[in-house]
Image (spheres, helix red, strand yellow):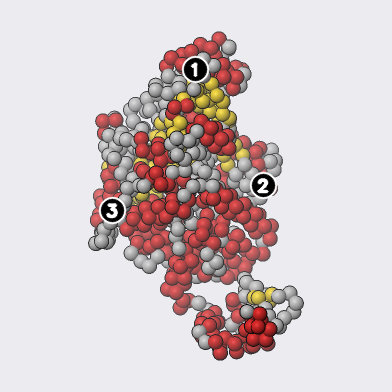
Amino acid sequence: MSGGLQDRMAAATRDKRVIGAIRLATWRKVEKRETALASLPHADDLRARAAQIRRHTIEHLPRYLGQFAERVAAAGGHVHFAANAAVACQIITKLAAARTLRLAVKSKSMTSEEIHLNAALEAQGVQVVETDLGEFIVQIDRDRPSHIITPIIHKDRKQVAEAMVRELGCEYSEDPQVLSMIARHHLRDIFRRCDLGISGVNFGIAESGTLCLITNEGNGRLTTTRPRVHVALMGIEKVIPRLTDLPVFLKLISRASGGQAMSVYTTLITGPRKPSDRDGPEELHVVIMDNGRSGILNGPAAEVLNCIRCGACLNACPVYRNTGGHAYDSVYPGPIGALITPLLFGPAHAELPRASSLCGACKVACPVNIDIPALLVRLRHLSRGQQPWSKRLLMQLWSRAMSSPTLYRWGQYLLRGIVADDGTGWATRGPGPLGAWTTQRDLLRPAARSFRERWREELRDDA
Amino acid sequence: MTPDPAAGASHGTVDPAFVQFVAQLQPPPANDTPLPQQPLDELRALAPDSDLVQRFTAAATEGGWQVHGATATTLAEVIAGILPPPDAGHLVLEPLSASALDDERAAALQNLLTARGYDLRRGHDDPTLFDSAAAITGVRAAIAENGMIVVHSGPQTARGMSLIPPIHVAIIATHQIMADLFDYFATLAPPLPTNITFITGPSKTADIEGVLVTGIHGPRTVHAVLVT
Ligand code: SF4
C-alpha cells in the first residue's frame, strides 16, 4: 500500500468486510483479556512489578546484555552481534552457507520480519518455510502479516482456502480444522527434512543465558528441536535479569495477548544439545540485533523498549480496529507500532504517531504499563513541523480558544453558524481547516444551545 | 546462575563486536539501585496449602487436558483405557526416574500393554516418534495455578516425546503438583537442563477466523493421569 498515512487509513476503512472481521476478532480478544486479568489475583501488582523489572533492565542494559552473552557462551552457544538489518541477514546467510544448510524452518518472529530475512536467505538458495499457521498462509499467499500476534486477522477462511488449493494442490474446504490439518501434514514433511531452525526470542535471561520462547502451536518447539542448527534472533531490549523474574511476565503476557492463563508451550532453552541429550540442535547461535534500538535508549521515548510485544494494545486501539494493520505500512502496526516504527526506521514514518485518537485504551491494556499516549504526544511534538498548514492552524486556534473563556464562547457561536444541525448530530466534513481533521473522523455538531447558556437560563436554580 | 560446563557442553563464543557495542552503551545512572528481590509471596495466584489436586484438575481441564485419576495398582489399567487400539500404531514409552513413571512402573506398564497386543518402543529416534500413535512419559513437575506440566530434556527424555506423537499421556504423581508458577522457579538451580517446557494443553491455533483448532503441530489429545 502506498501513499501517505491519510490515504492509507482512508482506503483501509473502506474495506468493510475486512474491517468487520478485524473488529470482531479484536473485540473478542479485548473481552478475553479483561476477564483473564480480572480473575488473576494481584494483577495490578504484577503489572507494576513487570514494569519495574523492564524499566530496571533497560536502565542497566549494558550490564545485563554483557552477562547474557557471557552465559549463553558458557552454556555452549555462540553470540553474534548485528548492528543493523543487513548485518543480521549476512550473519545468518553466512552461517547457512558455511554449513551447506538448505531448508530452513521458521517460527514466528517479528524481528525477522523487520529485517526481511526470508528474502535474504532465499537469494542465497536457502528455502525458508514459515511454520506458524498464520505466517505460513501469509507466505504462500505472498501477503504481509497485519498483526504482531495474529498475522492473518485480515483474512477470511475463503481466502485461506483459495491460497491453499492454489499453492498446495489440496481439495477445497472452508473448514478451519480441515485447512489446519492440511497445513500440519504439509509442514510435518518439512520438519522431517529441515536442517536450519530460525526463531525469535520472547525473553533472554541474563543470569543463565536462557532463551524463553512462547507459542501455542508447537511449531516453535519443532523449529528449535528438529534442525541441526538453531539460530535465535533477538533485539537488544529482550533481556531480563533473572530466572525468578520470568514468571512475573509469563503470568501476564498470554492473558494480555488473548486471555489465556499461559500459552500452550513455554520453552526455556539453555545452550545447544549436550552429549547426554537425546535430541535437539547441535549448534545454537544467538544473533543480538541493534537496528536502531540503542538510539532510542537515551532519548525521550526510551520507555518503548519496555514493550514485551504482547499485542494487547493493537486489539484495544479503535484506530487499529477500524483500519487493520496494513494501513500502518510497518511490520509493527497499532499503538506500539505507531511509536516504534518512526523511532526505528526514521522520519519517513514521522506521521505515524498521529494514527491515534489518544483515547488511552492502549495504556489500560499494556501489561507493563507503558504510557503509550504520552509517548505518542511526545513524538508528535517532535515532528510537528511536518503537519499540513491547515491542521497546524486548527490546532493553534483550538489552543487559543481553550485558554480564553471569551474566545471559546465566540468560537461556539461561530461553529454553530457554519456547521448547521441537520438532525443526525454528526458532520462528516468540517469547514475550512476542520476539513483535514474530518477526513477520517466525524465531527459532533454543536448543540443548538451550549451548556453555558442552558446553565444560565434554566439549570442554575436547580443546583 | 552460571550454566555448569561440567554438564558436558563445550564453551561457545561471543562476537568481539558485541563486547565493543556493549562497552560504548551509556553506563547505568549514578543513583544506581539494584532490582529488589522478588516479594513473590505477595504476588502468588495460589496459596501453597490450597487443594492442589482439585485446582490442577480444574485448570488443566479448562486448558484442554483430559484428566484421569489412578493409584499405583490401577495405573496400567487406566492407561490402557485411554490409548487408541493397538492397530493405530506403535507407542513410545520412556521411564523417568523420581517420577510417577520410574523404571519399575514403566516395566509393569510395558508388560501389560504388550500382553494386550501393543507394540511398545523405548528407543525413539525421530522416525519412531513421527510414526507413533502415542507417547507415554513422566513429568518433572505440575503446576496447579494454571494446569500445566513441566518436562525437562535429558538423558531419559527427548524433547520430541511430548511434541511429535499425536497423543501424549503424561503421568503425574500428585505430590509433584506445586501451587504456583513461582514455586517451580524457586526450585531451579544450575545446571539447567538444555530444554524446559511448560505445557498447558493440546497444541492450539486460532489463526483462521479465530476458530479454535487443536493439534496443529503438537499433540491433538493430551491426557494427564494423576497418581496418588
Ligand atoms: S506496548 Fe504494551 S500492550 Fe503494546 S505490545 Fe507492547 S507490551 Fe503489549
Q: Amino acid at mark 3?
A: Pro
Q: Looking at this view, is A61 or A389 the one in front? A: A61
* Label ID, residue B34: 3
User: Residue B68, how many percent across, how many down?
Assistant: 56, 25
Task: Give the distance between the C-alpha atoms of the residues marked 3 and 1, in whole angstroms.
Answer: 49 Å
The secondary element bearing badge 1 is classed as: loop
Secondary element under disc 3, as helix, strand or loop, is loop
What residue is rendered at 33% in x and 45% in y?
Answer: A242
Residue beneath disc 1? B72
**Quadrant of the image occupied by residue A267:** top left
Please tell me which residue lies in front, A282 or A210: A210
Chain letter for mark 1: B
- Alpha carbon separation for disc pair 2 and 3: 51 Å
For the residues carrying marks 2 and 3, which lies nearer the camera in this image? Answer: 3
> In the rendered view, does A271 fall on the left or right side of B148?
left
Tell whether circle 3 marks a residue whose Cβ is less than 8 angstroms from ligand 1. Answer: no
- Element at badge 2? helix
Residue B98, position as x, y percentages in the image: 39, 22
- Upstream in sequence: badge 3 or badge 1: 3
Q: Is residue A332 visible?
A: no
Q: Residue at x 49, y 22 (%)?
A: B228
Residue lying at the far top of the rendered structure: B115
Tell me which chain the residue with mark 3 is part of.
Answer: B
Q: Amino acid at mark 1?
A: Ala
Q: Amino acid at mark 2?
A: Arg
Any part of residue B187 in sight? yes
Q: Are marks 2 and 3 on the same chain?
A: no
User: What is the x, y in percent for residue A443?
Assistant: 64, 75
Picture quarter with the N terminus of chain B: top left
Residue under numbered circle 2: A157
Chain bearing mark 2: A
Between the C-alphas of marks 1 and 2, the distance is 48 Å
